[in-house]
Image (cartoon, rainbow, N blue to C red):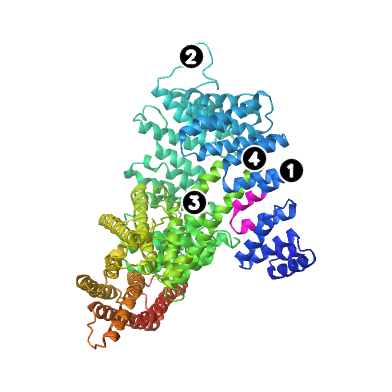
Amino acid sequence: PCADYLDNGNNKMAIQQADKLLKKHKDLHCAKVLKAIGLQRTGKQDEAYALAQEVAALEPTDDNSLQALTILYREMHRPELVTKLYEAAVKKVPNSEEYHSHLFMAYARVGEYKKMQQAGMALYKIVPKNPYYFWSVMSLIMQSISAQDENLSKTMFLPLAERMVEKMVKEDKIEAEAEVELYYMILERLEKYKEALDVVRGKLGEKLTSELQSRENKCMAMYKKLRRWPECNALSRRLLLRNSDDWQFYITYFDSVFQLIDESWTPPAEEEHSLEGEVHYSVEQAVEFVEERITEESKSSRPLRGPYLAKLELIRRLRHRGCNDEYKLGDPEELMFQYFKKFGDKPCCFTDLKVFVDLLPSSQYSKFIQQLLAVIPLSAAPDSEVALPGDIKALQQHLCVVQLSRLLGIYHAMDKKDKLMVVRELMVRYRHGLEFGKSCLKTELQFSDYYCLLAVHLLLDLWLEGEEAAVWQCLTLLEEGLAHSPSNAQFKLLLIRIYCRLGAFEPVAELYSSLDAKHIQHDTIGYLLTRYAESLGHYAAASQSCNFALRFFHSNQKDTSEYIIQAYKYGAFEKIPEFIAFRNRLNSSLHFAQVRTERMLLDLLLEANISTSLEESIKSMSLSPEEDDIPWKDLRDNRDLTVLFSWDPKDRDISEEHRKLSLEEETTWLRIRSLTLRLVSGLPALSHCSQPKNSEKTAENGVSSRIDTIRSLLQQLEAAVDSGKKFLEQKIQYPVLGPPPTRMAGFFSNGSCQCQTSLFYLVSDIYELDTNGLEDSAEIQERIGNSFKSLVERLTDLFNKCKGDLIEVRDGTLKTHPNLLENLVFFVETISIALWVSSYCDSVLRPFKSNLQKKKKKKKESSVAMPPVFTHFLDYVTELQTLTSNVIDHIKGLEIILTALKLEELSLKDTLLLQEEKKFTKTVQGKVQSSYHHSIQEIGELLKKRLDTIKKLKI
């Protein structure tokens, strides 16, 4: 019953049941462990661990106790303890196949490859089954992959693995496909491509059956490595004869033909062309081959796209080599037109042709589009001036043309009036197209959704050209689209981006959660959420969005071990290195590092010196200024920057250059944030350790080293800030749907950066005062006094940059000022750092003051002069208090203005809005207003808590 309670999540009952059992049989191992699991799950980790160790020390060998302990250790994230458990069990029961294999898997969880190799061989000696032998071989390969020294892996681990497999081959003991795969993998890693080819083509290769064309693909890979182009060509030709729609083999076929032409290859006179049969080695043969495929296609029962696209691909390659005209392959424009006639009603038609549009001369664009439009059956309804499609096929064809028009830049060239006309037309088509989707389920997309998206893209162009009303229309149309097609991820993603650009985060959280991002998506699109949550003042949502991401990254560690174990069990050896690479890629993810850093800064911002002391907060995060856990050299940018559909021409779309620049910007900003966090984490340690300057202990206690750490981090911060400023001088503009810029520009321009850096310099001065004492430190005291003054000035400047209306109504249109909101958030953060530094000052000055008062009492003099630093500090704290109160009042004022904004009365001057759109516009504006209101409330609440901590700072 105890285990049942645990399974049902009733942990308290499980503990009671276990106690009852233990009263009767006090040495029942299994009951103790089940009780420990209950304790672990109710948050009593230490008791659970103590109980578990008590049982483990007895080295149990009964299956129940071992299984239960394994579960417990896994929940404790201590897989290394499982290995000790089974090492002991195997010693006591040396011939147990089960315990040996559990031991092997326990090593696999912690990545002990050498011990895995030994455990695999030990298993094979007890039970000579092939899989166990090959587990051991695979562990050798893993040692070679994880070895830092490549030489070692090529001279020791891999040759040893090769000899082990060869032994089995000679004894004719190879049974399964996985074993052949493993042999191939070893030879490939040893760069013995010729031998690998012989294995695949030989008798062993016959076992490769589980994947389609597995042998052919492996042969092709080896031919490419060996640069045996005749074989590449003949094999891809043969495979295309079998299936003329397999695109990858067209690519290999063309690659190899041109390689052979460049090498002036000719077939040998007497024997076969190549191992794989006949070879094509001239353009004439290639042209003829493609034409034959097209003729064949016309006889096939279903239309195939491959042959037609292959012809365009060949034209593109010939043009690239500057020799297209002498081969009569036809005019690309005509070929694309014919392709459209054949496949225009398929959604893939646009993406197929997108690749080849640069074959068209730009002077022909409009003519080409008109030509396509002419073949679509559209009929004008009596009450509408727009000719509409009569069925889904015609709708798909028309959509394809509209997408091509956008791609060819035809819409971009229009003026404002024409763009608005097109938007209207697209929306008429969108609403008309909804009729075809009446029977669609909630989870299906409407056929005409792209019309709505394209209309929004046009409005975004207008917005970027300075047309303020356009952005509200974007949101209106997207919300309308989403109402009809609630599962359309593109609508949601675009809404997220636009709301964030306007500074409204509240609607975003709901949209993102309705996307239902799974697993790896927390890394690829999580940036859409984490970039804006905190910077727009939604602290609670920011915590939550960081948690989503961190939960995924942390569970990745555990999950990947399970995948690897399954791969061993089922002999999917080639997947194991992939899983390891996947885990490493996630561990060095840029987004993971950003979320970790921002999450800790956020926690300090919300809790340090409010609900817990700064010192406790830092301790609970096990933060230390010396440690940097970000793999700077290996950072991987896993963001999916093309997740939003875009039909922009190449010159307006996101380029490789944008990606590089965005990564550089993100990394610089991460460096600044990470150094800020480490500097803050060094504060509590300073106040404990200061020693008077003439005491001998300083160097030994590592105290001086602590201030040295702080000073060295400060230099690094200065360097990072410099490179950030250099970066911003380039004034980079990313495409509107490209990567969002970081918060760095605001951080520099509003003065937060100067404030925060000077606060850390102040720490260094106060430390100096602490070690020198009050007597002969007039100069330092003056310096500190000046720092206090300039800090107050800087903070006041920062506050001035927060002033202004967050939302204003201009010519009947709303305009939001998200930068004011971002400045306020930076202000709160900077004030918090100022307070943490002040409480360090406080901890230094208090003991000085009490010493002075003692002296005063002894001398019974009334006029012991107070050193100036005390008055400086008191003035500074008073001014901080006044400033913070002013900001809180300002925020109250903003709240009143926001509440009073009567959005209903906005006569949106664009009378083009239809009645049904007006209700969506109201919704959208309401969401933005409510989101700003929410931000202001959260920022105000936090500042009030900070104000309370200032009041405690009077020495």
Residue 827 in view: yes
- Residue 219 appears at what percent x and percent y? 55, 28
Q: Earlier in the sequence, mark 3 or mark 1?
A: 1
Tell me where the magenta segment starts and ends, as one range. 72-85
Q: Earlier in the sequence, mark 2 or mark 3?
A: 2
Q: CA distance from mark 2 to mark 4?
A: 53 Å
- Residue 99 appears at what percent x and percent y? 71, 45
Circle number at residue 586: 3
Q: Nearer the viewer, mark 4 or mark 3?
A: 4
Q: CA distance from mark 3 to mark 1?
A: 37 Å
Q: Is residue 144 left or right of residue 700?
A: right
Q: Is residue 469 left or right of residue 725?
A: right
**Which residue was labeled with disc 1?**
96
- Residue 487 appears at what percent x and percent y? 54, 61
In the rendered structure, does residue 3 fall within the stretch colored magenta?
no
Vertical comparison of 740 with 917: above or below: above
Q: Nearer the viewer, mark 2 or mark 4?
A: 4
Q: Quadrant of residue 723?
A: bottom left
Residue 381 in view: no
Q: CA distance from mark 2 to mark 3?
A: 51 Å
**Which residue was labeled with disc 4?**
119
**Which residue was labeled with disc 2?**
268
Q: Nearer the viewer, mark 3 or mark 1?
A: 1
